[in-house]
Image (cartoon, rainbow, N blue to C red):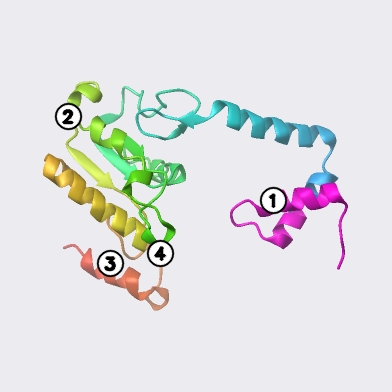
């Protein structure tokens, strides 16, 4: 079996620790790094160090930010009466791309998963409940919480748990619709997606 020099092996091993990176991808990345000019490598190192140094969680919504509160929570143009709950920061980015949602966000940084040992105490829920009070939301009463967790078993379980938590507090709790993606073909849709599409049908 071909063995690489120790520094190369160490770099490959570090890349393999990243999510979604297997042995082949790790090797390709390592050899790509070795082919780069030193200035490019330094720029990559600086970017990695800067993100670890400057990026933190927003104290209000838990989004990744370099200023606290983040630009969403501090924006005077956002509708503070609506909070959209998402699992991860990149889910927030997907919603922002629609340019149709103007409310606030709350990032859980995960979802409930008994199989993986993730319970409610491991999600960032405490500050969500605090934000529902006008005194913690610049005097604005939260009228609706949108549960935009993923349409997976874990996402569904998280949405159900949150709805049970929020409804007794008198806050309107809604769930994003799920079903057929635009431009798809019925022939290739799985049964769970089809079931959701039928359940979420509306009159035209």
The percent coordinates of residue 136 (x first, y second) are 24, 24
- Residue ID for mark 1: 15
Which sits in the foreground, 139 or 166? 166
Task: Write down the residue under mark 4.
Answer: 183
Inter-mark Cα distance, 1 to 4:
36 Å
Between disc 3 and disc 4, the foreground one is 3
Labelled pair 4, 2 in contact (Cβ < 8 Å) = no
| Label annotation for residue 196 | 3
Give the number of marks. 4
Distance (Cα) linking label 2 and label 3: 32 Å
Q: Nearer the viewer, residue 166 or 97?
A: 166
- Residue 35's disc number: none
Q: Residues within 10 Å of mark 1 (few under 14, many from 20)?
A: many
Query: What distance separates the C-alpha of mark 4 from that of mark 2?
Result: 38 Å
Q: Is residue 76 above or below residue 156?
A: above
Sequence-first tag of 3 and 4 = 4
Q: Is residue 169 left or right of residue 37?
A: left
Question: Where residue 90 appears, x then y in whole percent?
Answer: 46, 44
Magenta range: 1-28
The part of the image, by quadrant, that contains residue 95 is top left
**Of tags 2 and 3, which is closer to the observer?**
2
Mark 1 falls on what kind of element?
Answer: helix
Camera-nearest label, 1 or 4:
1
């Amino acid at each position: 079996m071909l063995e690489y020099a120790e520094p190369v092996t160490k770099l490959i091993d570090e890349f393999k620790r990243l999510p979604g990176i297997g042995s082949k991808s790790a090797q390709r990345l390592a050899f790509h790094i070795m082919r780069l000019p030193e200035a490019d490598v330094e720029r990559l190192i600086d970017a990695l160090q800067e993100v670890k140094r400057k990026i933190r969680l927003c104290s209000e919504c838990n989004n990744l930010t370099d200023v606290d509160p983040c630009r969403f929570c501090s924006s005077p143009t956002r509708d503070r009466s609506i909070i959209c709950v998402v699992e991860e920061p990149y889910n927030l980015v997907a919603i922002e791309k629609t340019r149709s949602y103007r409310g606030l966000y709350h990032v859980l940084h995960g979802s409930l998963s008994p199989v993986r040992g993730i319970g409610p105490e491991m999600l960032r829920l405490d500050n969500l409940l605090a934000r529902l009070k006008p005194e913690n939301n610049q005097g604005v009463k939260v009228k609706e919480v949108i549960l935009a967790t993923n349409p997976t078993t874990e996402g569904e379980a998280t949405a159900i748990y949150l709805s049970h938590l929020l409804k007794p507090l008198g806050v309107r709790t809604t769930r994003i619709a799920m079903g057929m993606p635009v431009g798809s073909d019925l022939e290739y849709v799985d049964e769970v997606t089809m079931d959701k599409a039928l359940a979420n049908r509306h009159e035209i």
